[in-house]
Image: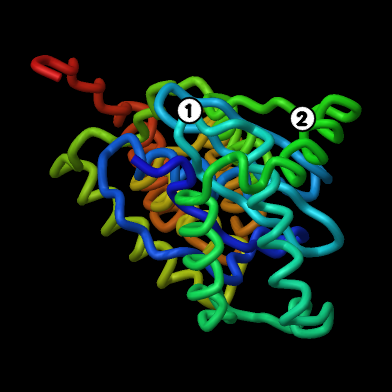
Amino acid sequence: MSMILFACVVRVRDGLPLSASTDFYHTQEFLECRRRLKTLASRLAQHPGRASAQGCDFSIHFSSSGDVACMAICSLWCPAAMAFCFLETLWWEFTASYDVTCVGLASRPYAFLEFDSIIQKVKWHFNHISSTQMESSLEKIQQELELQPPTALTLEDSDVANGVMNGHTQMPLEPAPNFRMEPVTALGVLSLILNIMCAALNLIRGIHLAEHSLQCYLYLFYSPARTAKVVLLLLFICLGNVYLHGLRNLWQILFHLSVASLSSHQILTRQLQEKPSDCGV
């Protein structure tokens, strides 16, 4: 089995993949590692330079300089010096082919698809060359790693960190409040019809039209502090009818007050439905 399994070139500031090697591995563990590599790619700006993330089956190494980073998925027995030597070679090949302006203007993933063949060639070279043939290069990288070790990351924390960065913090799940009202009764329908009649009789008086419309709303929909609203609304309707005593006869006033009282009673007696128990869930 090869030691370097997958490699890609990524833009540092936003994690946009610019080019990648052909993927020949489709195991569940490898696909999971690819997903976590994508998560780490979005956090490259937080970890400049070299870094490694160790998993159960694979390891991820990446090296960034400027706005270009090279990332690789390697087998666990791949030496870190070889992995970073490969990434450094890949970085030089890419920056020699594309300047900073081209990288900055890239607007779609894998914009430099033609570079994939270079990645494949460099990856094949490192997977098949003996360590003695590249001894000097490995010694140089090994000395750099000893002087400045790469940042150690964990793959298990990558999902959590990515969720926080995107604003999706994990919140405890709580049952949503149930605001479903009890079914409308025949007496409730009658109170609605009478309220509509009263509202129609008060079309030219905006305040009284609003009072009866509000009673219909309170009956049909749940509202916080319903009792206080119903009492205040009934009081306003009574005061309004007292004010209109000279314009209405006694029967008209009694009709409006009766409708308001019936509607208030229906509003207060119509309660929220009890939430059914989650049997069998």
x and y percent of residue 107 in the render?
A: 64, 80
Q: Which residue is mark 1?
A: 76
Name the residue located 61 percent from the left edge and 51 percent from the top edge.
Answer: 71
Q: Secondary structure at mark 1?
A: loop
The residue beneath circle 2 is 151
Residue found farthest to the left:
280
Is label 2 in contact with label 1 (beta carbons under 8 Å)?
no
Residue 99 percent across, percent down from the top left: 81, 81
Residue 199 found in image quarter: bottom left
Residue type marked 2: Thr
> Viewer-proximal residue, 207 or 73?
73
Q: Residue at x 59, y 31 (%)?
A: 79
Q: Secondary structure at mark 2?
A: strand
Seen in the image, is 146 located left or right of residue 181? right
Cα–Cα gap, marks 2 and 1: 17 Å
Residue 248 is tagged as none
Give x and y (percent) for residue 206: 60, 69
Q: Nearer the viewer, mark 2 or mark 1?
A: 1
Q: Is residue 243 left or right of residue 95?
A: left
Please indicate, yes or no, whether residue 257 appears anywhere in the rendered image. Answer: no
* Quarter of the image with the N terminus in it: top left
* Mark sitting earlier along the chain (2/1): 1
Task: Name which residue lies at 68% across and 36% down.
Answer: 81
User: What residue type is disc 1 on?
Assistant: Leu
40 or 22: nearer the eye?
22
**Figure quadrant of residue 82:** top right
Please identify the quadrant where the C terminus is shown: top left
Q: Residues within 10 Å of mark 2 (few under 14, many from 20)?
A: some
